Amino acid sequence: MTLQSIEIVKANGEKARFSIGKLRSSLARTGADKHVVQRIIDIVRDELYQGISTREIYNRAFALLKNEQHVYASRFKLKKAIFELGPTGFPFENFIAALFQYSGYKVEIRQSVQGKCIAHEVDVMVNKNGMTNLIECKFHSEEGRNCDVKIPLYIHSRYNDIKAVWQEDKQSLLEGIWIATNTRFTDDATQYAKCNNLNLLAWSYPEGNSLKDRIDRLALYPITVSTLLTNTEKKFLLEKDVVLAKQLLENSYLLDHLGISESRTPKIINEMKQLCNLVHRENS
């Protein structure tokens, strides 16, 4: 049995050919050096079998990375960590707002905006250089659920209602609207958005400037990637509107409120610093 003949089962039940290139790329994004990456690939490759799930491959690679260095495992679990921002969509909205805020935008969250016909609650409003963009967030708490064309159709109609009266009482110009999701858009949704100049932001879209690209480039990782914080601790921090590792470093006193021991605190702080690229990466 060759690697080319091995079929894997994705989260949505679809089958696909195993790609060693995709695995290598995912491992390399963690910051692990090429020797560590190759060693993990060799182990995973030897354990492959026909019909293995992507979850099994992920869990094995994650465990091996964690044995090398916790921060590698933290970066590797980024996609899963975004799902852990649920079950409500509020932490995801806060996360998207934070991504734009740390990119130089002034942000407002969950604002009521009057349209020509009705008022609309806008998830995130961002402003830079006198230009305002509206952002609607569509969060899914499980893999395999994508945004179909009904999403941009609905949001486009809301945007047009707001745009019809925007300039009557606003100080800034309305530049456009974004639709952000933690999963994917269907081909019809992407085609409709392109045709109507809607901006889409998804896990792997657009190429080179997707959600995962922006997070890696800006080192703006959600606290849910942590391998040291418990789920209860993460939930507490999310409820305090702390969604980024960077924000936890800026509000580290919250670790005291959680009653985290003196021995764990510096380890958590160091993990957050590594995620934010504030300390030298090993093997860089």
Image: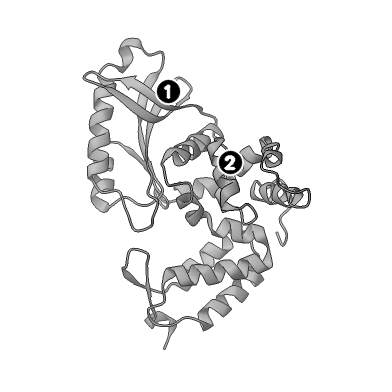
Q: Residue at x 65, y 55 (%)?
A: 228
Q: Quadrant of residue 33?
A: bottom right
Residue located beneath label 1 in the image = 131
Q: Nearer the viewer, residue 247 or 105?
A: 247
Q: Quadrant of the N terminus?
A: bottom left
Q: Residue furthest right?
A: 262
Q: Quadrant of residue 3?
A: bottom left
Residue located beneath label 2 in the image = 237
Q: Quadrant of the C terminus?
A: bottom right
Hey, what amino acid is under mark 1? Met
Residue 85, how many percent across, how many down? 48, 46
Q: Nearer the viewer, residue 248 or 198?
A: 248
Residue 59, how many percent across, how many down? 52, 68
Q: Residue at x 57, y 42 (%)?
A: 236
Residue 230, how many percent across, how many down? 60, 53
Q: Nearer the viewer, residue 222 or 89?
A: 89
Q: Residue at x 23, y 18 (%)?
A: 116
Hey, what amino acid is under mark 2? Leu
- How far apart are the two marked residues, 1 and 2, measured between alpha carbons? 32 Å
Q: Nearer the viewer, residue 161 or 70?
A: 70
Q: Residue at x 37, y 67 (%)?
A: 10
Q: Secondary structure at mark 1?
A: strand
